[in-house]
Image: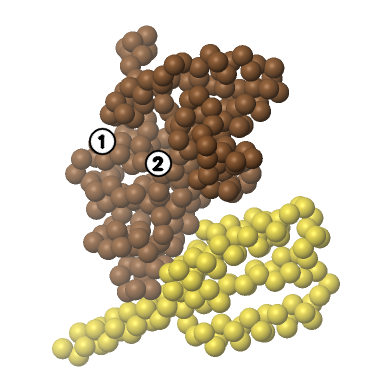
Amino acid sequence: MLPCTGRIDEALLLAAFENGADGVMVIGCLEGDCHYISGNIRARARVERVYKILEQIKIGPDRIRMYNLSAGEGERFASYANAFVDQVRNLGPSPINLVRSTNAQSAVQTAVQGEAT
Amino acid sequence: MITGTPKPIEEVLEMLEPYDNIIVAGCHGCVTVCRVGGEKEVQVLASTIRLAREAAGNKINIKEVSLERQCDPEYVESMRPYVGDYQAVLSIACGAGIQFLAEKFTTTPLLPGINTGFLGVTERQGEWAERCQGCGDCVLHLTGGICPVTRCAKSLFHGPCGGSVRGICEVDKEIKCGWQLIIDRLKALGQMENYGKLKPYKGWSSARDGGPRRIIREDMIS
């Protein structure tokens, strides 16, 4: 749990993908309404940088998105979350997870063949 | 500070193709300040490389380090105990730092992760501009603190050329004429007499024309 999206940096967002996230949704306070003045503006710039990195390395830029909400907009949060989950589902697993799942399947097959012989 | 820009990630990945066990090395000096080669940039670049390589089915192991300075031997030596355990070092320090690592670790390939730029200043966040070419014979006391070597596209020493129009250099509409800046500044300081004090010629032997330079301070050598 972070007290402010201003704490998020590019490395933290990329670490989420390294740790197996298919998508990352960053939710900050409404612009102009940051308790720490410009935390959410900084976060937006960092999310945009990661968007470009994901595009360059073909992981898919649409796997990351930033939204701005106030604490009282629970309904809108749910609708944003559902829309983002749909978007990531349409994209499918990240290329990292595809490779990992293929490798895991191969390892299982090898182990099964080993036991059979 | 010494400035730089990140190399395109495609170029970095191409350099790293032969390797699967490397060090990404940053520097806490100039490149940290201009946000191209510090500890944070090491984390981001290492993560980007790992993601790209794993997605391509060709995983890579990366040790992330960031030295106080890559241009000083005592900090460079701190890498010696483990540098031999890796196939290559991708350095995101300036060209001086990268070369110093290459000199010290002769059996390890050194790869540049950034393109080193120039000696410059931060004009605003995210924008740097050149101010010094290290000519080795400073005349800023005569030119109102504005360097004719750097700020004039032709490095002229005796006033503006015919390409200066309304204070703009003919090289680019975004470049102010260095000599116009100097004259305006000398006028503002009431030091126009300095305009005539410039040397009749500029000796360039202390600049790059004399080949790679070396400074020896006898008083500091122990």
Q: Is residue A25 above or below residue B18?
A: below
Q: Amino acid at mark 2?
A: Cys
> Which residue is located at x 26 percent, y 40 percent?
B102
> Which residue is located at x 48 percent, y 42 percent?
B3
Residue B104: mark in rendering: 1
Q: Which chain is represented by brown in the image?
A: B
Q: Which residue is mark 2?
A: B94
Q: Residue furthest bottom?
A: A116
Label 2: which secondary element: loop
> Which residue is located at x 25 percent, y 36 percent?
B103
Image spot of residue B22 (x, y percent): 31, 54
| Residue B147 appears in the picture as rendered | no
Query: Dot 2: few (<14), some (14–19), or many (≥20) neighbours within 10 Å?
Result: many
Question: Which chain contains the residue that carries disc 1?
Answer: B
Q: Which chain is represented by yellow in the image?
A: A
Nearest the camera: B164 or A42?
B164
